[in-house]
Every structure is written in structure tokens, then in C-alpha cells.
Amino acid sequence: MAHAFSVSVWILLLSVSNIAFAHHGRDFLLVQSAHIPESGDAYVIARQDYLDRDDGRETELEPGAVAGVTDWLTMELHGHAAKEEGEPMRYESTGAVAYVRWTPREARWSIGTSVEYVDAADNELHDEVAAAMLTTYEASDWIFAMNLDATHERDSSEDDSWGIRGAVRRSFKRSVAFGVEFVGSFDHREDREVMFGAYLHPMHPLTINLGVGTGFDGGPDYTLRSALIWQISTGD
């Protein structure tokens, strides 16, 4: 599977042209940037993750849609399904997210916030409320991003969980970028990960993000992650 993943990356690299990346907030796979869509822009997103852990393998799917409501507000709706090794695929939750950008769109420093409500499909699981501070800096061909996350489980005795995410990427020919991302959870060791990413824009409506990662201090043995982002409308 890893070999096929690598071959796919190089085929995509050879096929891309000199097209600029869109600002849809999906500059990375593990990290959310503060580059939210412009008013009227809308995208559909297909997210696929494969995780190999000590206790088994897991495949996760997250289809969704995101749209710029105003110049400073973006809304997202997505679902989450997962398949653990030896078990059937099951639908786990639906998430609704609001992203707010607090700085001018043309500023090098972009600051934003996100608030998400996750409705668990299983009555045995708890709904969640998550919030994040989003910071992004853009300079020439470089993008740096950092998130500070907080998650609260409703009707649960569990303490709130906190985490930090960071990423950096560099663009080449304006349609290919490479970068490194990490997740550092303060509470859940199984979520700690560092990942190498390739971010591609092979044609105007389509962005493809691909990543290969590994855990640290209790994280997964290795991960394969991908996201397909297709623009379906524009405010122009």
C-alpha cells in the first residue's frame, strides 16, 4: 500500500501545471489554516485516513462540504465513518463547524477561530464541543500554521482535552508544495503524530493533499492520509 501511495504522488507531480493554490483553509492535512474561503466560494471535501496502531488497523472517512458565508465567516458540515480491523464500517458522528477570520484577507499574519459541535451517532458515545485558535503566516512561497485546540465532552466526567498542532510548507511552481505537520496532544498520547505532506493543485477546481506519518510517544506506528478538495462554486 505504501509503494502504491508513493507512485501516485509522483504521477500527480508529473501532471501538475503552473496553477496557483486556492485559499480554502485546507493548506494542510492535520492543521487548519486561517485562510478561509471567500464569500460565495464552496467546496466538497473527501478525506480518507489509514492508521496502523499497536492494537490494530483503522480506516477513517470524512466527507464534507464547506462554504464562505461572508468575507469573515465560513461554515462546514461533515460526517465521520470508521472501520476497525475485523469490524464493519460504521458511521460515528456528524460535525458542524463555524470558522471566523479576524484579520484582513491580504495580511501576512492571519488569525481566526473555529467552533465545532460533534453529534455522536451512537447513544453510547458523547457529543463534543471543540474550539481552536488558528494562526497562519504567509511569506513568499512559505506558509506556517499553528492551532491551539480544546475539546469538551458533553454529559461526561472526562476532563477537557487540550492539544497543539503545527505545520510548515513550501510551494514549488505554485501548484506543488511539500511540508511537515505535527500533532501534540496534551491528554491523548495515541494522537501524537508527525507527518510529511505533499499538497497538489493539478487543475483549477481540484486540490489533492497526501501525507505519510508516524506517531511519537504513544502515537500510531504509521499513517497514510489524503484529502480531495473540489471547488463547486465561486463568488466571482
Image (cartoon, rainbow, N blue to C red):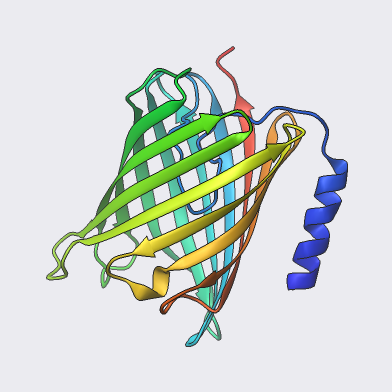
Relative depth, front residue between 153 and 151: 151
Task: Out of 43 and 23, give the one closest to the viewer.
Answer: 23
Please tell me whether residue 200 is drawn above or below residue 153 in the rendered image. Answer: above
Residue at 77% x, 33% y is: 173
Residue 3 at what x, y percent from top left?
79, 71
Q: In which quarter of the image is residue 214?
A: bottom right
Which residue occupies the foreground of this view, 10 or 1? 10
Seen at 41% across and 22% down, the residue is 69
Of residues 161 and 57, the one drawn nearer to the viewer in this rendering: 161
- Would residue 6 be found to the left or right of residue 132 on screen? right
**Outermost top residue:** 236
Q: Residue at x 49, y 54 (%)?
A: 30
95 left or right of 154? right
The answer to whether 34 is drawn above or below residue 221 in the figure is above
| Quadrant including the C terminus | top right
- Location of residue 19 in the rendering, given as x and y in whole percent from the top left corner: 75, 28
Residue 190 in the image: x percent, y percent? 40, 75
Give the side of residue 177 with respect to residue 37, left or right. Answer: right
The quarter of the displayed image where residue 199 is located: top right
Q: Residue 202: x percent and y percent? A: 77, 38
Location of residue 51 by image quarter: bottom right
Left or right, 125 with reference to 75 = left
- From this view, report whether residue 220 is shown above or below residue 149: below
Q: Is residue 103 above or below residue 76?
A: above
Which quadrant is the N terminus positioned in?
A: bottom right
